[in-house]
Image: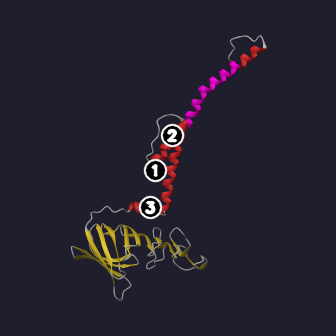
Amino acid sequence: MSQLPFKLKAPDDWLWASLWSILIVAGGLLLVLPKVQQPYQQRIDRDYYSLANHLNVSISVLSEKNLKEREVHRKAFWEEFSKIREAEEALEVSNKEKRIASTIKPEVEMTLVTKRILRAPGKDYEEAYFYLNNKKIATQRIRNNHILEQFGDIPDSKIEFVNDQYKSYGEEFYKDGKLHGRSVTYYEKGAVEKEIFYIYGELMLVKQYFKEGQLKTEINYEDARDYPGETEVGVGKIYYEDGSLRYEWNITNSLPQGYKKAYNDKQELTHEVYINQKGEQI
């Protein structure tokens, strides 16, 4: 224990001794507090820079080591972070769709190829004819967005197509002779009718819209069971024009007992069916 530099002789001496002790304690706190604050500051800086790097957000930081100023900028960062999250949520894009889109961005040389889609008379499929410089180079037979057969070679390119039967048009991409990336179809007056995502010819996601822009149908085939000729596989949802659910199904490999359910406009369940892994109704 520190020794007082004088002897106590009177009550006044006790007062001076108390003041001296206070000074000693205050001096000790001044030495200790910076060491206590330092880990807290380091933790703030670590969190700040870690999140900034993760989000690739460029936000200026003051170089002063004043803790309050750092807190102000930390708060500003979190406000920016919240704005980014809100923007992502506003897009209403599922994580699966993000991952699919990130892996199928086409990187192909833009060669202008056109495609014309016609209904095959007396058949349950459509026929598509591909042209390069007004010369037919390939033919396809298509049913429910699936390519049944393909004849001829299609170059890596952007394809512009028209559908004579439905009076629609759009564009798609081919890579290594297969549909790859986002295919989009427009109504005659320009509104988006359909979006389809492929990965090297494999159908992954279909989204259809009403003419007014509301989502009409959404089908994710990523984990769909393979039942030949069956269109209601994967995870699908069909909506009324007001956005409420009309019909849904989940026939996937990861779900042992699949189902199909229908709803009226009051969202009351009107019909349900359960499917085993063999595709049989339970």
Mark 1 or 3, nearer chain start: 1
Residue pointed to by mark 1? 55
Using the image as rendered, state which of residue 183 and residue 57 is in the foreground: 57
Number of residues whose C-alpha sits closer than 10 Å to that of mark 2, classed few (under 14), some (14–19) or many (20 or more): some
Using the image as rendered, state which of residue 78 and residue 275 is in the foreground: 78
Judge left or right: residue 48 versus residue 141: right
Q: Quadrant of the N terminus?
A: top right
Q: Which residue is farthest bottom?
A: 122
Q: Nearer the viewer, mark 3 or mark 2?
A: 2
Q: Position of residue 279 (x, y in %)?
A: 51, 77
Element under disc 2: helix
In the image, what residue occupies the spot 54% across and 41% down? 71
Q: CA distance from mark 2 to mark 1?
A: 15 Å
Mark 2 or 1, nearer chain start: 2
Number of residues whose C-alpha sits closer than 10 Å to that of mark 3, classed few (under 14), some (14–19) or many (20 or more): few
Whether 37 is among the magenta residues is yes
Q: With respect to residue 162, does 30 lie above or below? A: above
Q: Position of residue 268 (x, y in %)?
A: 61, 77
In the image, what residue occupies the spot 48% across and 45% down? 50
Q: Kindly identify the amino acid type of the residue bearing the numbered disc 1.
A: Leu
Residue pointed to by mark 3? 98
Q: Kindly identify the amino acid type of the residue bearing the numbered disc 2.
A: Asp
Q: Which residues are magenta?
A: 19-40
Q: Position of residue 60 (x, y in %)?
A: 45, 42
Residue pointed to by mark 2? 45
